[in-house]
Amino acid sequence: MSGMTAAGRLPENETLHAKDAAGVPEELLMSVRVQTPTRIVIEADRVWAVKCETDAGRRTIEPRRLDGIVPLTPGILTLRCQSGDIIEAALDEGILVKTGSSVSIAVRHAIRAEEKESLRKALNQELVRIRGMETDLRTALSDLESRFMRQFAEAVIHD
């Protein structure tokens, strides 16, 4: 790999490319955790690049970048691992926090496709599940409203 500094950092004007990932020193790799309010979706170590959607466009977070907080918009998260694996997930809005070699991502909803499954298929399945839940919720609210109105009408008539 070209041009590592004595401190084991890449010069500011260089970015990592897939062909260089295998030779990246351990101190230039990140651990990434993606979680929703109810579960941990991804825990990955030895990640050398995190690509995510922000309100300023698609951004790449690398280990040598300064620590910070980034608001995320709905989109695809891509993790590039030292092993050459690529992990993808569809994310809802949330926040990414980078501190040192640790990246924490907290989102409302996240879908990670299994290895054999496409992300599109996983998203479609999740949308069907959410729509079903919304339908059930609307039905329950409608029933609650009907019962309330019926009881209110009975109370007014008896007074």
Image (cartoon, helix red, strand yellow):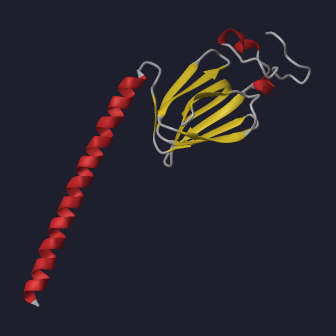
Quadrant of the image occupied by residue 139: bottom left
Quadrant of the image occupied by residue 154: bottom left
Assign the N terminus to one quadrant of the image. top right
- 141 w.r.t. 9: above or below: below
Assign the C terminus to one quadrant of the image. bottom left
Residue 24 percent across, percent down from the top left: 76, 17
Q: Is residue 88 left or right of residue 44?
A: left
Q: In this view, does 128 lie to the left or right of 12?
A: left
Residue visible at 14% across and 76% down in the picture: 151
Residue 113 percent across, percent down from the top left: 45, 26
Residue visible at 43% across and 18% down in the picture: 116
In the foreground, 52 or 99: 52
- 101 w.r.t. 117: above or below: below
Q: In this view, does 47 lie to the left or right of 8?
A: left
Residue located farthest toward the front when viewing the structure as drawn:
56
Residue located farthest toward the right when viewing the structure as drawn:
6
Q: In this view, does 150 lie to the left or right of 27?
A: left
Residue located farthest toward the bottom when viewing the structure as drawn:
159
In the foreground, 94 or 118: 94
Residue 23 percent across, percent down from the top left: 76, 13
Q: How many labels, in total?
A: 0
Quadrant of the image occupied by residue 106: top right
Residue visible at 61% across and 37% down in the picture: 33
Residue 2 percent across, percent down from the top left: 81, 10
